[in-house]
Amino acid sequence: MKKLLMALTAGAMAFSATAAMSADALTLQLKWVTQAQFAGYLVAKSKGFYEAEDLDVTILPGGPNMAPEQVIAGGGADIIVDWMGGALAAREKGVPLVNIAQPFKRSGLMMICPTETGITEVADFPGHTLGVWFFGNEYPFFAWMSKEGLATDGSEGGVTVLQQSFDIQPMIQGQADCISVMTYNEYGQALAAGYGPDNLTIFNYSEMGNDLLEDGLYVMEDTLEDPAKVDAYTRFVKASMEGWQYALDNPEEAAEIVVEMDDTGAAEFDAQLYMVGEVSKLVDAGDPALDLETYERTKDALLAQDIIENEPEGAYTTEITDAL
């Protein structure tokens, strides 16, 4: 009996090792640090949804001065989370990124201005300094300014652009009259600092019809020629959307998972719980497909301001989401 148990145990271990070795390895590069903006992927890994799809997924955090497009171009990732503006700009520069899924359907980008600045509408912008993030995050802002006919070089009748830090300090310290915030992140910081609708003018990109596509999933075009890779990507998107659904259905557990998976220790539970709640307004966990109308609006805005000069071809595929 002892020999039988030893044989069974050895067999189980061998099977487990073989299964682990056969799992398809994928590396996902996040656009920003480990936070609930990416809850679906973190939950999918923590809850074993990737493993159930025979995937071995490594998730890499991003950070300041880091461009996901450069990481994947250098072979450091198989899939990246990126904004469409950055992806299309990179594609035109020779990094052939392709959108394979679009979990975020709406933009979380806003610009906020304290009421003491006297800014209550776009017509009040000229002569003021506006805080803007760069590294691919600036494209929606410049598309908006182009649409409004406002120069962004500090000239008379235009605005001055401050390359903003990823927090609300430029507003608090008076470096900028208005700053960029995400509904699920920096706006929460502003609320905690005593700001809100009563003492802020809020320009919501989505409500103004100036929203461009944000967090989507991108891969390199040549990898889509490999049926095995396409199959792995399909399973990845399937498991990721299961992760998103679980996160939105269980926000407290999702926030706990984010905190546990943040190696820096910077993620705080209350902030991550707030973020899950706000992200739930932007993500459609039941439909990862790219909305082509929003894609066209994003692409046209980038063309209009010469961020891209040529009509993009092959910048997205529906093959992955069609297979789900």
Image (cartoon, helix red, strand yellow):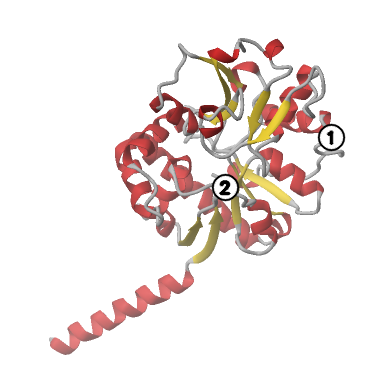
Question: Of label 2 and label 1, which has the lower sequence position?
Answer: 2
Vertical position of residue 114 compared to residue 59: above or below: above
Q: Is residue 9 left or right of residue 192?
A: left
Vertical position of residue 1 compared to residue 84: above or below: below
At x 46%, y 74%, the residue is 21
Q: Quadrant of the C terminus?
A: top right
Vertical position of residue 163 compared to residue 158: above or below: below
Q: Position of residue 55 (x, y in %)?
A: 47, 61
Q: Amino acid at mark 2?
A: Lys
Assess disc 2: are there few (<14), some (14-19) or many (≥20) residues with their C-alpha within 10 Å of its C-alpha.
Answer: many
At x 67%, y 28%, the residue is 294
Give residue 143's quadrant in the image.
Answer: top right
Residue tagged by mark 2? 31
Q: Is residue 150 visible?
A: yes
Q: Secondary structure at mark 1?
A: loop
Vertical position of residue 295 compared to residue 135: above or below: above
As drawn, the residue found furthest toward the right would be 310
Judging depth in this view, the residue of 99 and 141 nearest the camera is 141
Q: Position of residue 199 (x, y in %)?
A: 48, 13
- Give the total number of marks visible in the rendering: 2
Q: Amino acid at mark 1?
A: Asp
Give residue 135's quadrant in the image.
Answer: top right
Q: Is residue 182 left or right of residue 157?
A: left
Residue tagged by mark 1? 306
As drawn, the residue found furthest toward the left would be 1
At x 67%, y 52%, the residue is 69
At x 68%, y 63%, the residue is 74
